[in-house]
Amino acid sequence: MRGSTAGITTTLKEGSSAHYLFLCILDSVFSAVVVAPAVVGYWRSVWGLMAIYVYPDDSVMSGIVSTVVGVAGHILFALTQKFFEKYLHPDKKRILFYICSRIYTTCFAIVCVNGWRGPWLLLDYYFNYDLTILASLAGIGVIVLGLMRTLRNVSAPPLALVTDHVKDYFTVPTMFRIKVSNRQ
């Protein structure tokens, strides 16, 4: 979990390169064997809980609510990440940081699951597993991602395994090759 080590990765890199390589390999194996199945289990559990608690008898309304929670939540987290970085730091307020960061992670994870669940339910309902339409929508999505030069953001296990190397807990890293500046 990003930030939970509070700077331990920088001290590990200062040792021997063989030791650091061993730790990187161990991290990758642990990520693939333990963390990845745990994440899949978490997603499946939250998806199932949403099916029980969010309009269980109305798949359209459930899909709309999940989509709104997913989109609005991602926008909210994107807009507030600088605020959290500024006021919550493990070196300044350690206990508050750990409590808030765990609540933040839980909420963000629920938002992520809903961001996928909502559109998925709506696609299932409106297109009723019509392979031609679903393949067309997937093709359009790939073309749009390619035109926006963001197609490489969709790589995932088992084709790609990415470990976190970001110091700031609340920063959501992307693979975009652009620099962001705050112009006023």
Image (tube, rainbow, N blue to C red):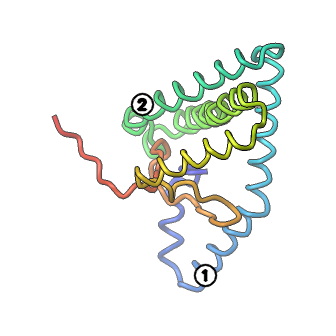
Horizontally, is 99 left or right of 184 in the view?
A: right
Residue placed under numbered mark 1 in the picture? 19
- What amino acid type is highlighted by mark number 1? His
What x and y, as percent, mark residue 121? 73, 29
Res. 156 image quadrant: bottom right
Task: Give 125 or 63, whichever is nearer the viewer.
Answer: 125
Which label's residue is closer to the chain start, 2 or 1? 1
Horizontally, is 73 left or right of 83 in the view?
A: right
Residue at mark 2 to residue at mark 1: CA–CA distance = 37 Å
In the image, which disc is placed on residue 150? none
Check the image and report above or below for 58 versus 73.
above
Check the image and report above or below for 38 versus 49.
below
Q: Quadrant of the C terminus?
A: top left
Res. 57 image quadrant: top right
**Crowding at mark 2 (Cα within 10 Å: few <14, some 14-19, many 20+):** few
**Count of numbered marks:** 2
- What amino acid type is highlighted by mark number 2? Thr
Task: Give 146 or 9, whichever is nearer the viewer.
Answer: 146
What x and y, as percent, mark residue 84? 43, 34
Task: Give 71 or 92, whichever is nearer the viewer.
Answer: 71
The residue positioned farthest toward the front in the image shown: 132
Q: Which residue is drawn at 78% across and 14% down?
A: 58
Residue placed under numbered mark 2 in the picture? 80
Horizontally, is 124 left or right of 95 in the view?
A: right
**Crowding at mark 1 (Cα within 10 Å: few <14, some 14-19, many 20+):** few
Q: Is mark 2 on a helix, strand or loop?
A: helix
Q: What element carries label 1?
A: helix
